[in-house]
Image (spheres, rainbow, N blue to C red):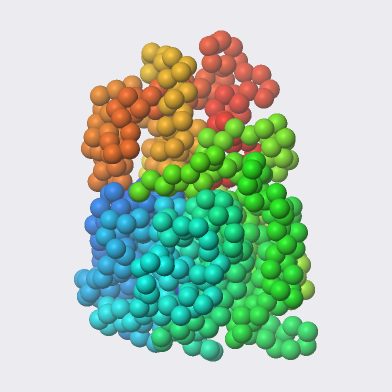
């Protein structure tokens, strides 16, 4: 009935009809096509036989959980340009259901209450200031008559906060800001005023407030009924580079932290900062799991957290005291360890990249990003979708904030690594795996190789995870919870990165998940754009899923060849304006259009109307006339044209300009790989 399954958000189900013995009989029960081709990250809810699921662009469906039949549909009609202040597509992670209402946050910052029976709006409030770079992608949480919601947008500046609204009326009850504001502006008249003045503000230097500071709470919010506390994880500091943000000084509270407040008033209780002075996009926004564990002979109420920085934290929920912090991925090089006495990580000096570039491990996409984890009380294990990546942090020489345009203080997309950096990156091929972690013994119990999304544990002795089997194809997989042995998998037309759920109706257990590709895929084998889906399984199901979508159209390079100087200029503009949506090196999986394959790549006039004129703004492609000239847009077309030409030769198996078949080490691995994006190179966090 709630995101994460219960108040504790363990994503563990007591259902066991589908178990180690019966899971081979799990077959499709039904599927439902969404009306959008964009990414899908929602955790569905099931209440009284009705499934509530959100989709891209903050839309909401109510479905018959037995058959997938649509009961109602709500479209908040988010304006296309509202998708601009987001790093990673217009996703939504879910809704909340409470006392006959369904609550959803929208990309443009609204919190909307819907009648659960009809889908009609009951009330709507704007939670952010209009025309500022905020968005909502996370699921609301509801408890004690209040709806709790944060926001996203830390890579665009802004100042993070969490708000509580009256669940019946939409009235603002309290607000807690995660970073201090402009000292000259005075207090916010918010629940956070005292703690920001006394604890947080002394940890900031320079003119951070000009940029906002960051710290957005864009995913993890958990209510704890044992202490009537609300916990939320905060995002990265902005800009990433602390040299520009805070004069290379200070912890910059409460960024990259877990904060506990009184659920009724928002009054500060405690905090723990996982990454002081964050300079690496190490958000602390991963889901927070509440459990009771026996540690050193004492039963403790703790929270478990596996954030992007690569350490697994066990924290006392009542006091905020750190009980343990252990690396759950190999090769962490930003800090050597966490001191349990002080709670502080021992940060490596070179990791601050003050004067020269540095290769960080884990990378900015994190050892574990937002993908949901699960905890089984039967095994005592936390199941984590883990990733081993690196990122080249190359600092800019100067910094200039541009309103509405991200400038994180490093050259993330256009950086050219040195030979030494390239070797460091190539030694860590990007790879993912499902990790089973014992939080008491602080060790890994098993790993299952493969890139996957959120997970679900069940009393049937199973762990379910959605995975990718191609750029835009997926599968749902079941593992033994105790050993990690793969017991079952079933292909789906889309990857599954959202958290699966399970529910029971009429004595029949179902397993379901929202499926839809991510914009972060690199696009080595793009597919035709197609709708995401909700897929459901049951024992001996008799349905069939749609066939796999066809491959994307071939590359469409212009016949004319642009001068090298024009292509080089276009690459610089592309890295600055286009890469975060359309992919590094113009390579992506075609969730948003793969520009190398675009029909308008050979049509300069239409290209200009789109890029400068904004004729596709209602679809999220804003016009860029306020930031670039028509000539610069044409230079971008020249660059993408050459990328399309390289891809064309790669797919034909020839070397550009020679007509000869590629030899070892060429083709898609060299001709179409973007500069600076060797194995393990990661883009910004999700």
In percent of the image, x 56 and y 80: which residue is there? 270
- Residue 627 higher or lower than 495, as above or below: above
- Residue 128 higher or lower than 592, as above or below: below
Q: Position of residue 550 (x, y in %)?
A: 43, 36
Name the one closer to the observer, 204 or 137: 204
In percent of the image, x 34 and y 51: which residue is there? 83
Q: How many marks?
A: 0
- Residue 271 higher or lower than 607, as above or below: below
Tell me where residue 304 sits by quadrant.
bottom right
- Residue 352 higher or lower than 585, as above or below: below
Tell me where residue 312 sits by quadrant.
bottom right
Give the side of residue 486 with respect to residue 372, left or right: right
Q: Position of residue 486 (x, y in %)?
A: 67, 58
Tell me where residue 108 sits by quadrant.
bottom left
Q: Is residue 121 visible?
A: yes
Give the side of residue 119 with respect to residue 364, left or right: left
In the picture, the quarter occupied by the N terminus is bottom left
Q: Position of residue 532 (x, y in %)?
A: 39, 51
Name the one closer to the observer, 160 or 105: 160
Residue farthest front in this picture: 184
Q: Is residue 514 visible?
A: no
Q: Position of residue 357 (x, y in %)?
A: 64, 41
Name the one closer to the observer, 280 or 526: 280
In percent of the image, x 60 and y 15: which residue is there? 661
């Amino acid at each position: 009935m709630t995101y994460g399954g219960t108040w504790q958000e363990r994503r563990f189900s007591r259902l066991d009809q589908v178990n180690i013995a019966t899971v081979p009989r799990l077959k499709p029960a039904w599927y439902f096509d969404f009306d959008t081709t964009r990414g899908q990250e929602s955790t569905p809810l099931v209440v009284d036989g009705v499934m509530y699921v959100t989709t891209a662009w903050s839309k909401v469906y109510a479905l018959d959980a037995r058959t997938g039949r649509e009961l109602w549909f709500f479209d908040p009609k988010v304006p296309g340009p509202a998708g601009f202040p987001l790093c990673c597509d217009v996703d939504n992670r879910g809704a909340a259901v409470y006392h006959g209402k369904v609550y959803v946050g929208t990309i443009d910052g609204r919190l909307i209450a819907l009648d659960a029976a009809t889908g009609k709006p009951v009330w709507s409030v704007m939670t952010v200031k209009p025309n500022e770079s905020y968005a909502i992608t996370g699921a609301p949480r509801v408890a004690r008559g209040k709806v709790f919601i944060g926001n996203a947008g830390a890579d665009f500046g802004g100042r993070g906060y969490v708000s509580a609204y009256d669940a019946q009326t939409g009235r603002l009850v309290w607000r807690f800001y995660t970073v201090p504001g402009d000292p000259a502006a005075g207090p916010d008249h918010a629940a956070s005023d005292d703690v920001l003045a006394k604890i947080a503000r002394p940890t900031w230097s320079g003119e951070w407030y000009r940029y906002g500071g960051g710290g957005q709470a864009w995913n993890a919010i958990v209510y704890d009924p044992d202490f009537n506390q609300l916990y939320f994880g905060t995002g990265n500091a902005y800009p990433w580079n602390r040299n520009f943000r805070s004069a290379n000084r200070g912890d910059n509270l409460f960024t990259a932290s877990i904060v506990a407040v009184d659920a009724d008033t928002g009054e500060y209780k405690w905090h723990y900062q996982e990454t002081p002075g964050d300079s690496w996009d190490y958000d602390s926004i991963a889901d927070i799991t509440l459990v009771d564990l026996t540690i050193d002979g004492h039963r403790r109420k703790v929270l478990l957290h596996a954030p992007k920085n690569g350490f697994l934290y066990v924290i006392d929920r009542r006091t905020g005291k750190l009980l343990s912090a252990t690396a759950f991925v190999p090769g962490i090089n930003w800090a050597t360890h966490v001191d349990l006495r002080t709670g502080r990580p021992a940060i490596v000096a070179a990791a601050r990249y003050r004067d020269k570039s540095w290769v960080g491990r884990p990378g900015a996409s994190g050892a574990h990003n937002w993908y949901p984890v699960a905890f089984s009380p039967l095994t005592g294990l936390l199941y984590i979708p883990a990733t081993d990546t690196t990122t080249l942090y190359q600092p800019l020489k100067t910094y200039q904030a541009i309103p509405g345009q991200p400038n994180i203080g490093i050259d993330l997309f256009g950086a050219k690594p040195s030979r030494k950096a390239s070797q460091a990156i190539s030694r860590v091929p990007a790879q993912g795996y499902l990790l089973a972690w014992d939080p008491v013994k602080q060790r890994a119990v098993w790993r299952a190789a493969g890139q996957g999304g959120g997970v679900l544990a069940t009393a049937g002795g199973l762990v379910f995870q959605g995975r990718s089997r191609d750029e835009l194809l997926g599968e749902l997989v079941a593992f033994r919870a105790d050993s990690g042995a793969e017991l079952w998998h079933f292909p789906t037309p889309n990857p599954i990165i959202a958290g699966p759920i399970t529910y029971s109706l009429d004595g029949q257990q179902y397993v379901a998940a929202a499926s839809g590709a991510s914009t972060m895929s690199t696009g080595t084998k793009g597919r035709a754009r197609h709708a995401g889906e909700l897929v459901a399984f049951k024992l001996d199901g008799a349905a069939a899923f749609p066939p796999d979508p066809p491959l994307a159209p071939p590359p469409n390079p212009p016949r004319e060849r642009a001068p090298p100087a024009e292509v080089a200029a276009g690459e610089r503009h592309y890295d600055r304006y286009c890469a975060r949506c359309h992919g590094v090196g113009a390579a992506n999986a075609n969730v948003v259009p793969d520009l190398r394959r675009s029909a308008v790549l050979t049509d300069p006039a239409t290209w200009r109307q789109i890029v400068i004129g904004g004729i596709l703004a209602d679809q999220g492609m804003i016009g860029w006339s306020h930031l670039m000239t028509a000539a610069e847009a044409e230079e971008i077309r020249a660059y993408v044209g050459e990328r399309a030409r390289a891809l064309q030769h790669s797919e034909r198996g020839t070397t550009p300009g020679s007509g000869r078949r590629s030899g070892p080490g060429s083709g898609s691995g060299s001709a179409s790989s973007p500069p600076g994006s060797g194995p393990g190179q990661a883009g910004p966090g999700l």
